[in-house]
Image: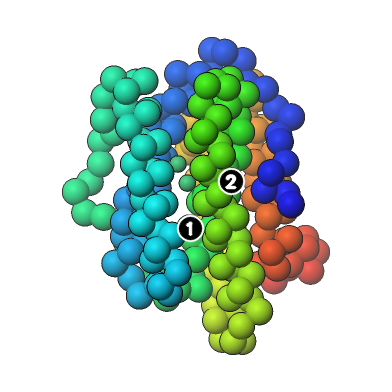
Amino acid sequence: MSSVRTTSIRLPPECEPALLERFLKAEAMALRTVRSAQLQGVPPNVYAFLRKHEEDEQQHLAQFETMIGRQPRLRERLPSVPRQWPALAVQIYGYESLGLEFARLLVALRPDLSSILEDEVVHVRFFEHEVRRILMGADEAAEQARVSAHAWWRKLPRTVARYLDAAVFDPLRHLLTEKVLGAVEQQFIMTGLLAKQGERRA
Ligand SMILES: [Fe+2]
Ligand SMILES: [Fe+2]
């Protein structure tokens, strides 16, 4: 399964502080998204998973807060997430897949943080399974998932650019962007959310 594949890019050690900063923000966002998702009408098995997922992200965030020595700046309101389960599943699956790619980069620099990577693999696998289930189910839900995935995918380059906006990433930015986008694209194609390039709708 491609979600356990390892990336071949190794960041130089001077990237570590900027990467930790990205994780502080991203883990906080993941935690708040998972909290927000629990307030939507999700299937019971998903709700049960989200409770454990929330604990994992809380723990990841606490680790980064300890390493960096401060808390992330956040708005008080929880982020708004799609109300419809197929769209919500795609969004969480997408962001967790993105987080997993960054976790691979992190662990290459900080092998002591490998438990975070292991948790992210579990998160991606769960939502991958749920997305496959949606795609095999009712036509309307499957179509909603595909449309959401397409829209999310189109916004992804901007998200990745934001993650990599520190000057320390300059020499590797192009390669990193290609790798991360390519990995998430492969995930989406493999699950059936996204058509292969050339067969895609505009
Ligand atoms: Fe996390
Ligand atoms: Fe996660």
Query: Split into 4 quadrants, where in the image is the C terminus?
Result: bottom right
Residue 24 shown left or right of residue 148 in the figure:
left
Q: Residue at x 36, y 37 (%)?
A: 59
Give me the disc on residue 128: none
The residue under label 1 is 92
Query: For residue 42, which quarter of the picture?
Result: bottom left
For the residues labelled 2 and 1, say whether their Cβ atoms are less than 8 Å apart: no
Q: How far apart in space, not on screen, are marks 2 and 1 (Cα)?
A: 13 Å
**Vertically, is 57 above or below 188?**
above
What amino acid is found at the position of numbered circle 2 in the picture? Val
* Image quarter for ligand 1: top left
Q: Residue at x 55, y 37 (%)?
A: 117
* Viewer-closest of 86 and 181: 86
The residue under label 2 is 121
**Vertically, is 133 above or below 196?**
below
* Viewer-closest of 178 and 4: 4
> SS class of the residue under badge 1?
helix
Q: Residue at x 79, y 69 (%)?
A: 199
